[in-house]
Amino acid sequence: MPRPLERPSAISGYGDWPAYVRSASRHQTSCPATQDLASTLGIPGRAGLPELRVDETTTHDGVTTAAVSWQLGFGPRTRGWLARPAGSTAELPGILALHCHGGNKFGGANRLVAGAHDSDALAAAAQAGHYAGRSMVRELALRGFVVLAHDTFSWGSRRFDLQNPPWRTAAAMAAQEAQWRESGIEPTDGERYNAAAAIHEDTLAKAAGLLGTSLAGMVAHDDLAALDILAAQPGVDASRLGCLGFSGGGGRSLALAALSPRIRSYVVTCMMTTFDALVPAYLDAHSWLLQTPGLWDLDDWPALTHRSTATSFLVQYGMLDPLFPEQGMRDAHELLTTLHQKNPNPGSTGTDSPDGPRADSPYRGSFWNEGHVFTAGMQDEAYGFLATALGARAPGGPP
């Protein structure tokens, strides 16, 4: 009998991931409402704060940016960028800037950083097409924040090794390669990787589910670690932390705010609808990052905001967004308005919600006649909202 062909690893580059998840305790939160969410996502716990390494620091146009990295308990080293107003000595509020999914797992947070994508045409195209050609990290630093942007689980520096893909991914890629040849297209390494990663995400979701976690849970694991790193930085006021993101980054922003009492204000851009509105026609519009098994049993997507202790949050809706039906966005807005009319945090403890019940709503929604983009106008609104909520001011500006 011939020997069977050796099967490639379905999780190449992450051979230590199963042992990490299976041996780790579950992520523990400080109140039942957030613990339910953490348990549904299957977030592994972490042991201690990762050690931050500063690889390079540059100052340009009023912003000092450090290329940084850290090692979590498994997988490749995490890359990030830490920026602040040049020459600042005051203690500043901190922002975690969360990159989108974008169908681009070859890159990660480099699409949010000025110049960090110089050798990555896909990240440059993402910044031009989704972020109005602006650097989110630079814009926030100029408004008086310390900003951290990092690659999260399965993106950029944290991506899987698909050079020798598992069989199902390889079979689908063979068909894709044939189509490229037929069309006379020579894809770049990044384009080839992204095509494979789109197919591999189903395998990744299977692996995560088998291990007792989820893609969204592993992303939250990485994001919670980054938030702790940001809070520990010199010159950061850990009592004034926020986060924001567009598209998949907006989903990460909502999840992080619901999981961590550190987040005092946050922004969700082009990632708000009811789950009911996704069924049946919009299911294929979204990735495993949004559609975690069991999540709808716990709560509708907008209702997860009720688990956060943040004192304010902004949701920006693109009314021409092809990824969401308009009615789903309007229903989400109505639900959020109702949920946050009187007591924004009924499930929270006094420890998690030092401000206590508030008569005014923490929720603000804004509607834009735009598609699935984070325009300059939307960015200015989001940055201004966070600056007001967290007490940031541009260097040299009025107090």
Image: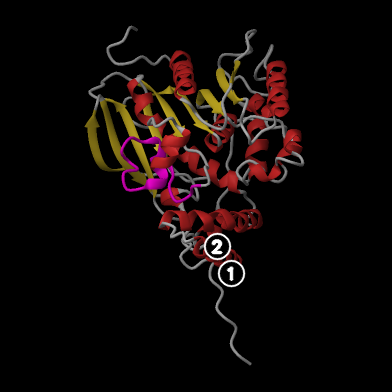
Task: Report the amino acid beneath label 1.
Answer: Trp
Q: Earlier in the sequence, mark 1 or mark 2?
A: 1
Q: Is residue 273 above or below residue 155?
A: above
Percent from the top left, x then y, of residue 301?
A: 68, 32
Quadrant of the image occupied by residue 350: top right
| Range shown magenta | 104-123
The residue labelled by disc 2 is 179
Task: Report the amino acid beneath label 2.
Answer: Gln
Q: Quadrant of the N terminus?
A: bottom right
Quadrant of the image occupied by residue 319: top right
176 relative position to 106: left or right: right
Percent from the top left, x then y, of residue 326?
A: 69, 27
Residue found farthest to the front: 183
Q: Residue at x 43, y 16 (%)?
A: 387
Q: Residue at x 47, y 57 (%)?
A: 193
Count every numbered label the image shows and give the total. 2
Q: Which mark is residue 167?
A: 1
Q: Residues within 10 Å of mark 2 (few under 14, many from 20)?
A: few
Question: Does the rendering let one see residue 74?
Answer: no
140 relative position to 244: left or right: left
Quadrant of the image occupied by residue 260: top right
Numbered disc in front, either 1 or 2: 2
**SS at mark 2?**
helix
Q: Is residue 394 above or below residue 99?
A: above
Would residue 122 be counted in the magenta stretch?
A: yes
Percent from the top left, x then y, of residue 364?
A: 59, 16
Most foreground residue, 182 or 336: 182
